[in-house]
Image (cartoon, rainbow, N blue to C red):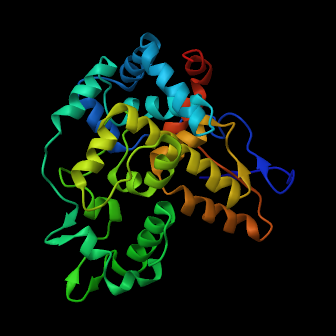
Amino acid sequence: MLAPVGADAGSVRIVPEGNRHAEQPPIPGASVRRTKAGKTTFDLKFEKVRDLLATDERLRSKIRKTASAYGIDPIHMVGAIVGEHTFNVDAYDSLQSYYVKAASYAGSSFRFAYEDEDIADFVARPEFSECAGIDDSYLLWSCREDVWQKTFRGHTVGGKSYPNNRLSAVFFQPFYAGQTFGLGQINPLTALMLTDLVHDRSGYEKLDETDAAGVYKAIMEPDVSLAYMAAALRKAIDDYRSIAGMDISGNPGLTATLFNVGNSRERAQALARRNAGGGSTWPEENYYGWLINDRLDELKGLL
């Protein structure tokens, strides 16, 4: 997510509007295959989610209200919703369908684990001792992700081998790989990271890794899911400002990109390191964010 920038305009630089790429970056093969398997196209999927937003004032009102609670422009939420439902999943025909889908998961029994090891037991291992005492959910799970990356990912520890994959993919996918659910398409680990912020801003009950069903209820239920979406976007904006010295709040394509790829803290750190030696780079949109900036006038018209 790096591209050349101009002169430093101060301690926090405002990232320019629009795309850095003249043409849309390549769309991942998995997204292309899913879309073909559904016998549809990206254009049709874009139009479907755009029409859902255009015809549902109740949904637009919820987006505006939630965005206000997190101090972000609602266009960031619109961009994330449109991107997810264009490239990753197909939109339902109505907001009510999301409520119905969420209700279908009620009472499900499952857990977050890898093989026979629950996530709660896993993070209680001594390797995670450096994370003990952290009482902010975002920093706590960020620390645990760091330990996973350094110590467990792709390694054998205590006679047990662990996959060379993300923590969220290994421990937080009890149904199938690559899963995100609901209107906001939030993954379970992201929800656990953001639960303190969502509790503080929206008043929803805090989530716990030992209650997988409770986590899924939160990310499936549209109202709560929108809060987690807004929290993720808020954190991305804050991370880039505080860590990389970049204000990305005026570029919905960048916030959409970060919503898509995740790990805004690590990406902001990488950008800060790149610029620390006198380098000068802007963050750069991916294929997902590129579409949002390309269609920005049309999407702003929905609000």
Residue 112, horizontal then vertical, whole percent: 23, 61
Residue 37 in view of the camera: no
Residue 283, horizontal then vertical, whole percent: 65, 50
Which residue is drawn at the image coordinates 51% and 48% (left, top)? 200
Q: Nearer the viewer, residue 280 or 75?
A: 75
Q: Is residue 150 left or right of residue 103?
A: right
Residue 255, horizontal then vertical, whole percent: 57, 42
Q: Is residue 112 left or right of residue 18?
A: left
Q: Is residue 162 left or right of residue 87?
A: left
- Residue 98, compared with residue 195, is above or below; it is above
Residue 232, horizontal then vertical, whole percent: 50, 47
Residue 166 found in image quarter: bottom left
- Residue 204, compared with residue 145, is above or below; it is above
Q: How many numbered dots are placed on residues in this image?
A: 0
Residue 92 in view of the camera: yes
Residue 278 found in image quarter: bottom right
Which residue is drawn at the image coordinates 69% and 64% (left, top)? 272
Identify the image quadrant of the C terminus: top right
Which residue is drawn at the image coordinates 47% and 77% (left, top)? 133
Q: Nearer the viewer, residue 49 or 206?
A: 206
Q: Residue furthest top?
A: 55
Which residue is drawn at the image coordinates 18% and 39% (left, top)? 105
Q: Is residue 189 left or right of residue 25?
A: left
